[in-house]
Amino acid sequence: MTGIVGYGTYVPKYRLKLSEIAQVWGKDTAEIENGLRISEKAVPGFDEDSVTMAVEAAKKAIAMAGINPSSLQSVYFGSESHPYAVNPSSTTLGEYLGIGNNYFAADLEFACKAATAGMQITTGLIDSENIKYGLVVGSDTAQGKPHDALEYTAASAACAYILGNKETESIAKILEMSSFSSDTPDFWRRDGAKYPSHFGRFTGEPAYFTHVIQEGKNLLAKSKLVPKDFDYCVFHMPNGKFPRVVAKKLGFTPEQLAPSLTVDKIGNPYSASSLMGLASVLDSAKPKQKIFFVSYGSGAGSDGFIFETTKEILQKQKKTIPVLKQMEDKIYISYPQYLRQTHTI
């Protein structure tokens, strides 16, 4: 059975408080923070992009998996902020890691669920015995136009997962997976446009909630399980409010959700969002615990997974720096410095 054999995360040190943004645009800080349930977000350094962050996350995943990089036979890179419009991030990453040349590679785009789509592809390749190990990365230096609602939540981070099917190496088996997709234009960026556009409140009910809840219901029906059968739940986190609402609607408790809520500390790093929440859960999970997971990507679609941890997780947890610890290692910057570092000016 295919499962996770290693994972790694990277959170930039720089943080921008939402109060800095609100002050510049004359907005009420308390109103914004209470509405979004976020107080600060992670910001990349001047010389960081989605590939450099992916490299850091992937190196940690390889170290945890305890395999040679040349053992990887696929690299799927999910992002909506690839450094180049034409020039693959996946092969740049593969070259740096020393994978070699004999591997499947592709850059994936499906808004914030690009990387979870890559996880499904990799699972298929492993289940069909075409590969033994595959690397999946979700990495974004998320863009939000100045004075747009997205500017308050769009953040930066990277997650990397290595999948395989050796029982003695897996820390979390994939028990089920499915998807729910539609043509719902709630969020988009035209070719050549620097910043994305969105339909504001339309991105909530007919987009995020419809897809995440329906996929959640499909996953529960397929697995014949109910919310109380799970120890944890993880959802895509466009802000701090949405995952809390959707968890309640599906029947999960605040205690099942709390360990995954990385959005409260770093904002929404797009393709890395739900996978960062999963990593935070895996940092403290115990053997034989079930994890309910649903991502979301505008456009629109949700990918669902059910994971069950194994006894191997206890040893491999010792090989990583917990997400919570990374999030506390931070340096606050001003709004002008944020604009310079993200090349907005």
Image (cartoon, grey):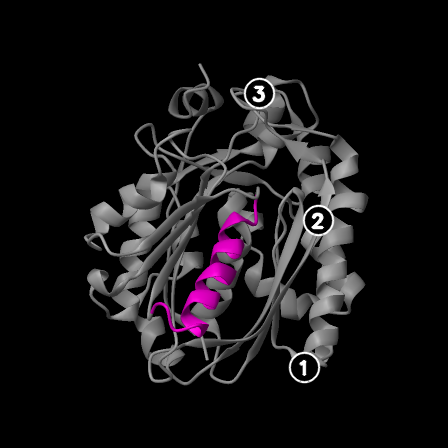
Residue type of the residue flagged with mark 1 = Asp
Residue 18 drawn at (x, y percent): 58, 33
Q: Is residue 29 left or right of residue 112?
A: right
Residue displayed at 56% across by 44% down? 110
Residue type of the residue flagged with mark 3 = Pro
On whether residue 334 falls in the magenta region, the answer is no
Q: Is residue 5 shown above or below 207? A: below
Q: Would you name the residue on which mark 3 appears?
A: 146
**Disc 1 secondary structure class:** helix
The quadrant of the picture occupied by the C terminus is top left
**Disc 3 secondary structure class:** loop
Task: Give whichever of 255, 4 is nearer the camera.
Answer: 4
Residues under labels 3 and 2: Cα distance?
Answer: 22 Å
Residue displayed at 58% across by 40% down? 39
Residues under labels 1 and 2: Cα distance?
Answer: 24 Å
Residue 249 drawn at (x, y percent): 80, 62
Residue type of the residue flagged with mark 2 = Lys
Where is residue 331, by image quadrant? top left
Where is residue 152, by image quadrant? top right
Q: Residues within 10 Å of mark 3 (few under 14, many from 20)?
A: some
Q: Residues within 10 Å of mark 2 (few under 14, many from 20)?
A: some
Residue displayed at 61% across by 22% down? 23
Q: Would you name the residue on which mark 2 appears?
A: 241
Q: Would you name the residue on which mark 1 appears?
A: 229
Which numbered disc, 3 or 2, marks the residue that appears first in the sequence?
3
Tell me where the magenta segment starts and ends, as one range: 112-131
